């Protein structure tokens, strides 16, 4: 474009004999008129001056010196024409490099942008309101499933029944909302006795188990605690997710009024442990069932937990009856007298009835056989390499510690 434009102006232009010459528009100006109409007036003016003072063909290779006094305006016109030519060429090149289609596309995008933006704002506000509504509904649902904890939270539990990791995890999950105070008792009987004694005397001390927010109680003590109004039902359990996830079997006995009085946090069975080295040394047969407890060679070598349920239950299993016998006279051969006779023989075999010391006697070797809860004897068997633990072949009882 630059070359074509310059060539059109470098051609010699002949003066027309007509005193009013007709201006002939070069091809380059026609092209420039189409591409840059705003520059046409400038280039046309320049063309008009060139037609008025065209160079002579015979002077194409020489420079004519003008006399300043005679034609002072010719020099000015020449300089002005050169300046206009340079400006026209520059603007023409700039104009030809800008496609008109892009400008049209930009204006269209500018016109459509506000419409699209307004729609996005409306959609954003609607989505935000819906999200806020969902969050608010979820928060209300979450609040309905939780109940306020007493601060500080005081718990009376059975010793060694709560793993330290549980306590640490619970404290971390609650943060500053609860100040946990955990107290332990030696046996479930101690906890139940402390509860019943305080109500009988109508004297509830601040440090007693009755003043605690949560207590541990054995499943065999639950009915007595409910009957004597020693405990209160747990409120809001029916709405908890963990409760709905339990099968009917794990929900236990359903209260007639639909109340939840306790929830198990650990369970197990009654097992029998014996020292393998002692039995091997004295050529004794391994323990397999309840009947082995009445073997004469084991007299004075047995320790049992101090639990009437487990002791009498073992006697009933030895006699072929069930742990859950309701009527001993009608369901057990020989009735009550036969049960008492077998129980007296067992007392002669047992060295110690104690729910705490029975494990110590077994550990130091005073007892070769221990009858107790799996939560006690299984950890002991891991610490002592010569201990075997079995579940009696005829069956055993299941137990659960409850909150």
Image (cartoon, rainbow, N blue to C red):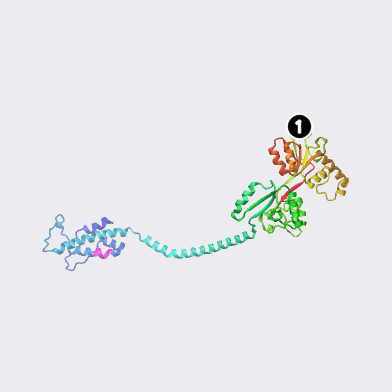
Residue 240, how many percent across, how many down? 66, 56
Front-lying residue, 101 or 108: 108
Q: Quadrant of residue 68?
A: bottom left
Q: Quadrant of residue 316?
A: top right
At mark 1, the secondary structure is helix
Residue 255, how many percent across, how many down? 75, 57
Does the rendering let one see residue 27? Answer: no
Numbered range of the magenta stretch: 39-44
Does the rendering let one see residue 114? Answer: yes
Task: Return the residue at label 1.
Answer: 280
Residue 106 in magenta? no
Front-lying residue, 211 or 372: 211
Residue 75, how many percent across, how many down? 16, 61
Residue at image point 81% right, 34% down: 297
Looking at the figure, which quarter contains the N terminus?
Answer: bottom left
Would you say 20 lies left or right of 127 here?
left
Residue at image point 46% right, 63% down: 117
Relative vertical location of residue 319 with respect to residue 98 in this rendering, above or below: above
Residue at image point 29% right, 58% down: 93
Q: Residue furthest bottom?
A: 20
Total numbered badges shown on the rendered structure = 1
Relative vertical location of residue 381 with respect to residue 197 in this rendering, above or below: above
Would you say 128 lies left or right of 186 here?
left
Residue 275, how many percent across, how many down? 74, 35
Residue at image point 68% right, 38% down: 383
Relative vertical location of residue 32 with respect to residue 267 in this rendering, above or below: below
Q: Main secondary structure of the magenta part?
A: helix
Front-lying residue, 30 or 240: 240
Would you say 208 lies left or right of 80 here?
right
Q: Residues within 10 Å of mark 1 (few under 14, many from 20)?
A: few
């Amino acid at each position: 474009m630059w070359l074509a434009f310059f060539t059109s102006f470098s051609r010699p232009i002949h003066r027309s004999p007509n005193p009013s010459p007709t201006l002939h528009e070069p091809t380059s100006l026609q092209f420039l008129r189409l591409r840059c109409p705003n520059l046409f007036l400038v280039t046309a003016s320049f063309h008009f001056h060139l037609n008025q003072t065209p160079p002579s063909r015979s002077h194409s290779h020489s420079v004519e010196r003008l006399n300043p006094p005679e034609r002072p305006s010719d020099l000015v016109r020449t300089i002005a024409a050169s300046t206009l030519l340079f400006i026209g060429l520059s603007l023409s090149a700039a104009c030809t490099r800008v496609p008109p289609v892009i400008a049209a596309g930009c204006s269209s995008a500018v016109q459509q942008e506000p419409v699209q933006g307004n729609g996005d704002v409306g959609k954003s506000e609607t989505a935000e309101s819906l999200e806020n509504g969902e969050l608010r509904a979820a928060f209300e649902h979450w609040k309905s499933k939780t109940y306020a904890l007493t601060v500080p939270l005081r718990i009376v539990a059975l010793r060694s029944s709560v793993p330290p990791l549980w306590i640490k995890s619970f404290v971390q999950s609650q943060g500053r909302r609860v100040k946990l105070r955990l107290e332990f008792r030696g046996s479930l009987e101690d906890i139940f006795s402390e509860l019943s004694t305080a109500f009988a005397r109508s004297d509830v001390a601040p440090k007693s188990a009755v003043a605690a927010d949560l207590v541990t109680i054995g499943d065999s003590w639950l009915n007595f605690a409910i009957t004597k109004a020693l405990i209160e039902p747990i409120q809001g359990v029916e709405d908890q997710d963990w409760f709905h996830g339990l099968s009917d079997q794990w929900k236990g006995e359903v209260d007639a009024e639909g109340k939840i009085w306790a929830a198990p946090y650990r369970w197990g069975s009654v097992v029998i442990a014996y020292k393998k080295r002692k039995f091997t040394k004295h050529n004794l047969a391994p323990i397999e069932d309840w009947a082995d407890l009445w073997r004469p060679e084991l007299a004075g070598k047995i320790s049992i937990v101090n639990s009437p349920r487990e002791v009498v239950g073992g006697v009933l299993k030895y006699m072929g009856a069930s742990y859950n016998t309701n009527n001993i006279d009608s369901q057990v051969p020989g009735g009550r007298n036969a049960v008492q006779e077998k129980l007296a023989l067992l007392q002669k075999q047992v060295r110690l009835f104690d729910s705490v010391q029975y494990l110590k006697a077994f550990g130091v070797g005073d007892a070769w056989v221990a009858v107790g809860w799996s939560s006690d004897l299984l950890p002991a068997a891991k610490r002592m390499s010569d201990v075997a633990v079995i579940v009696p072949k005829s069956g055993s009882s299941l137990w659960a510690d409850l909150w």
